[in-house]
Image (spheres, helix red, strand yellow):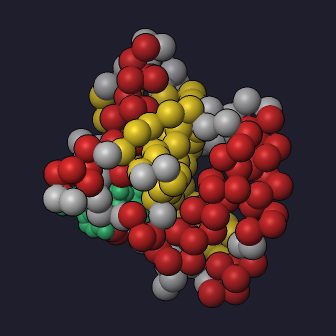
Amino acid sequence: MTERQRREAIVVRRATQGDAESIATIHVDAWRHNYRGLIDDDTLARRDFDSRLGTWRRELELGAEVLVAVQRQAVVGWARVGAFRHPPETRPDVRSTTQGWAEIHGLYVSPSAQRCGVGSRLLREADSVFTARCFRNVGLWAFANNLAAIRFYESCGFSDQKLDQNFEINGQPLVERLLARRL
Ligand SMILES: CC(C)(COP(=O)(O)OP(=O)(O)OC[C@H]1O[C@@H](n2cnc3c(N)ncnc32)[C@H](O)[C@@H]1OP(=O)(O)O)[C@@H](O)C(=O)NCCC(=O)NCCS
């Protein structure tokens, strides 16, 4: 199969309850594969499949909007999409900048399928969902030290909004960077 055919063979659809296992597997595998060196080994080891599966089953049951990319009948990536989230601790400058935006809540591609066009295809499908709902801007938070993901988003038209926020996972301080683009 040529590279072009590989990229064409990706189908994106809305996730169902039956996709929870695939979504959780990709989530855990991509964390361990891509975040080694960015996040403490201890934290990565604690990201276990069973707890992720429980979380995803609940999220899908509650109506989380997740797009899955399918290649040769296997789910190879997912994107969770929706309105921009503003938890209570959101800073006023972040809140005012991102008010009314769409958000990519999460985007993960199976390590074995990375760099084959799956992530960019999921972003294009997310665009269709957002424009159908009249959103004008889409944003997302990426770990500031996740340079590979930042390169990926930049290649898809996102730019650094110069609004970082501090974040903590299991006591490890991390910085998240706001990336965005117009739809
Ligand atoms: C980031 C991620 C979603 C990208 O998905 P992907 O399917 O591998 O990306 P694509 O194949 O669509 O890449 C499109 C373009 O983005 C850029 N890109 C992708 N991965 C890159 C990397 N590791 N380094 C530099 N540029 C990259 C390239 O320009 C690429 O085009 P090319 O392959 O023709 O050169 C995927 O690597 C992933 O799941 N990473 C782990 C989880 C993660 O970091 N998610 C983002 C959280 S905010």
Q: Residue at x 67, y 36 (%)?
A: 16
Query: Which residue is pictured at 40% across the width and 39% down the height?
Result: 11
For the point 49% across and 29% down, which residue is it? 102
Q: x%, y% of residue 140?
A: 47, 44
Measured from the top left, where is residue 92 in percent x and y?
A: 58, 35
Q: Is residue 163 left or right of residue 92?
A: left
On screen, residue 111 above or below 66: below
Q: Is residue 80 visible?
A: yes
The quadrant of the rendering that contains the N terminus is bottom left
Residue 93 seen in render: no
- Up/down of 60 relative to 21, above or below: above
Q: Residue 67 in the image: x percent, y percent?
A: 53, 38
Examine the rendered structure and indicate whether residue 2 appears above or below residue 126: below
The quarter of the rendering in which ligand 1 is drawn is bottom left
Q: On the rendered structure, is 91 left or right of 36?
A: right
Residue 52: where, in percent of width, then height? 75, 60
Decide if residue 143 is on the left or right side of residue 85. left
Q: Quadrant of the C terminus?
A: top left
Q: Nearer the viewer, residue 20 or 51?
A: 20
